[in-house]
Image (cartoon, rainbow, N blue to C red):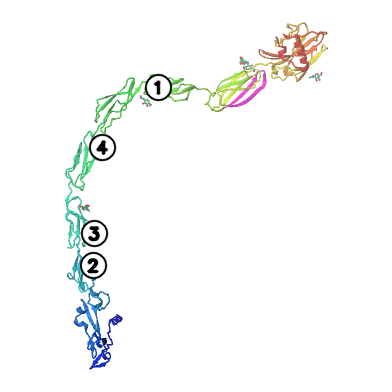
Amino acid sequence: MEDRNTAMIVLLLLCIAAELQVDGLSLDVCASCHPNANCDDKSDGSGKVCNCMYGFVGNGRTYCQDKDECQIGASKICGFQTTCHNTYGSYYCTCLSGFNPSNNMDVFIPNDGTHCQDIDECTITGLCGEGGQCRNLEGSFDCSCMLGYEVQNGAAPFHPHTDKAFCKVVDCGRPVPAEDTVLLSVSGTTYGSAAMLVCEEGFVRRRGNNRSVCEADGRWRGGDMICEEVDCGLPPAAPHSHRLWDQSSRLGSRVIYQCYSGYHNVGRGNVTVCTAAGEWERPPVLCKETLCGSPPIIESTVQVWDGGSAPGSRVLYVCKEGFKISGGNNSVCSETGQWTNPTLTCQAECGPAPVLDHSEVVWHNQSVVVHRCVEGYHSWRGSNISVCDSSGEWRSATLTCIEIKPPVHHLRVLNERCVKWRAEKYEEDTEKYKVTYTGSRDYQRSFHDKRKRFLSSKADELQLCLNLLPVTNYSISITAASSRFTASITTNTSLTVPPAPDVYYREFETPVPTLRLRRAPNKLDPISVYQVFVLPVEGIMIFDCSSPASSDPKIKSSSEYITGQFDVQHVGTEMNFTVGDGLLYGGFFNAPLQNGRSYYIILRSVSQWKSALKSSCVLWAKVTGTSYVLRVSSLSATAFVGLVAFFIIGGYSFNWFLKRT
Ligand SMILES: *[C@@H]1O[C@H](CO)[C@@H](O)[C@H](O)[C@H]1NC(C)=O
Ligand SMILES: *[C@@H]1O[C@H](CO)[C@@H](O)[C@H](O)[C@H]1NC(C)=O
Ligand SMILES: *[C@@H]1O[C@H](CO)[C@@H](O)[C@H](O)[C@H]1NC(C)=O
Ligand SMILES: *[C@@H]1O[C@H](CO)[C@@H](O)[C@H](O)[C@H]1NC(C)=O
Ligand SMILES: *[C@@H]1O[C@H](CO)[C@@H](O)[C@H](O)[C@H]1NC(C)=O
């Protein structure tokens, strides 16, 4: 700044070459110029002249003294709102306080157009403090307060730097609610704050404003609400109903609605309340006339009804023809609009109860019959109840009564060989049977045939073949394992044809031939004998093997005779017998054979028990004397010859061969 100031000072020290015109002497004019003067050409070109430099005044030669430019007044030389400062040979300007040079320099010389202009102090915010309002003045400013603020410690306008005054916000204090109102909310107490008012409980706003505002003059305004106590007046009536009301029509008062008798409420409720709006709620009650409608239909009945369906109406039921009544016979329309349930039923008459085989009725009423099996029968399956249904038909019991039978029954013997029986058991069950049988013989004390068989079967009919021995009394028992039930039966077996012994057929030419045999295994030894027949060969001979053995040898129809008899049980495995030795064998005389005659010797095996007799015969030997041919029954001679050949080969005989015709 100093430099600039220095620079701004224009030193117009010019050497003025003044033309010194002294009496016609031509002098160097310029040399005579004052140091603060310049040597200039004369305007008419007639020489030089000394002129004081700018900022100096004088004659240019002897003196050029400083010129005080400020003398003519600052406003004239520097402009408005300035201060002029003279310097040696020059000057400069500054702005008054509150103003600013337009070139923004501290000092200026107005010849460049610079001037002083007012400073707007109000651009600085907060200059007047909170709530203050700045006003710019020429070279200055002042403050006042905004709306809602008031000056403290002074009066407006004020200058914040010089005065103690300041602005303070207006405070309305706490609002006081009007009568019957209460403050709902207050945003503050200062200017612009608002308070909301509501009516006191039980009061309702009639008119006025519910909002109070703190205004600039420090007063609350606007909360002029007028509240009146709620009065709902007379409660509204609802059709077909009474009101139960305590005559209070204040807020919250209640009225109860009750439907008239014969009506019932189908609405959402039965209470209405006096609301804050000063009105009763719409009554929720809705009374409808109570009606039962048509009485219920009951099967097989006819209704006797006058068509009334209001509470107390009645309907009478009568059973249709062919049905009989049970239970109550009427229904009443109740207060709740429903027909009471008639307990009545009309039962079709079913007639006599169904009869089931082997059963009896144990209990019955008009519609139900309970059956049970008679004694000796048990129920196998099915229901034991017959029901008379509404159509008058019996739904008959399905009970099946079956005879109570032992698990094994119908036991019998077939063909002296097999036992047969019936099983009594549940279908599909497998039963285990034990069959034991014991045989005994009167004629053979030592004999015991004791055997067991086991059998499992699902069958209802069973058969088991046992290898029973002949002429034996058997006792057969069958035990069903599941029930440990035993059924028994006795049986006897009949006499069978005894087997013939093995003989060694021979032909002899001696009258005392010794014949041999090997006894046949026989199970009937105690009742069996071997008989040796002698048949003299004479004419046509017929030998009947099954003829009863005459024990008396003297009674003989033909020439044949028994020459010896042996109890089989005393015969060893082999036996030699000599025909015609003159001894007694088993009471028979073994008579000597006649020389020169031919004989056939036949061995007969006989079993006899009581009146039963069975026998078989073999041709044992031929004693030759003459050559007769034996004819047996209807067989031809050739057949016999063939047979003899057979004897020789096999040594066996078969009883059928020598049987009677
Ligand atoms: C105030 O009154 C206005 C209108 O008058 C209403 O809309 C508003 O709900 C009221 N405020 C309260 C708090 O009652
Ligand atoms: C007969 O008895 C049955 C079974 O106890 C019962 O359900 C029914 O109502 C009775 N019927 C009559 C007509 O008494
Ligand atoms: C079988 O028993 C009967 C009667 O007890 C008896 O008379 C008969 O002799 C017996 N038969 C046998 C072969 O034992
Ligand atoms: C043997 O049984 C038959 C029938 O099976 C009977 O007629 C006969 O009398 C019985 N005999 C004896 C000796 O028991
Ligand atoms: C029967 O006779 C034969 C020969 O003659 C003899 O070898 C046998 O021992 C006799 N048998 C008996 C049981 O006497």
For badge 4, the amino acid type reads: Val
Q: Earlier in the sequence, mark 4 or mark 1?
A: 4
Q: Earlier in the sequence, mark 1 or mark 2?
A: 2
Which residue in the protein does label 1 denote?
394
The residue drawn where x is 39% and y is 19% is 352
- Tell which tag, 4 or 2, sits nearer the viewer: 2
- Kindly state the secondary structure of the residue where label 1 is placed: strand
Q: Earlier in the sequence, mark 4 or mark 2?
A: 2
Q: Quadrant of residue 182?
A: bottom left
Q: Earlier in the sequence, mark 3 or mark 1?
A: 3
Place of residue 243 in the rendered image (x, y in percent of width and height, measured from the top left): 19, 40
Q: Neighbour class for label 1 at 10 Å: few (<14), some, many (≥20)?
A: many
For badge 1, the amino acid type reads: Trp
- Tell which tag, 3 or 4, sits nearer the viewer: 3
Q: What label does residue 266 carry, if any?
A: 4
- Tell which tag, 2 or 3, sits nearer the viewer: 2
Q: Which residues are magenta?
A: 431-456
Which residue in the protein does label 2 denote?
130
The residue drawn where x is 18% and y is 54% is 209
* Residue at mark 1 to residue at mark 2: CA–CA distance: 112 Å
Q: Is mark 3 within 8 Å of ligand 1?
A: no
Task: Please report contact status of discs 4 and 1: CB closer than 8 Å, yes or no.
Answer: no
The relative height of residue 65 versus residue 493 in the rendered view (above or below) is: below
* Residue at mark 3 to residue at mark 4: CA–CA distance: 50 Å
Which residue in the protein does label 3 denote?
187
* Residue at mark 2 to residue at mark 3: CA–CA distance: 20 Å
For badge 3, the amino acid type reads: Ser
Q: Between residue 192 and residue 629, name the one nearer to us.
A: 192
Can residue 213 be seen by looking at this rendering?
yes
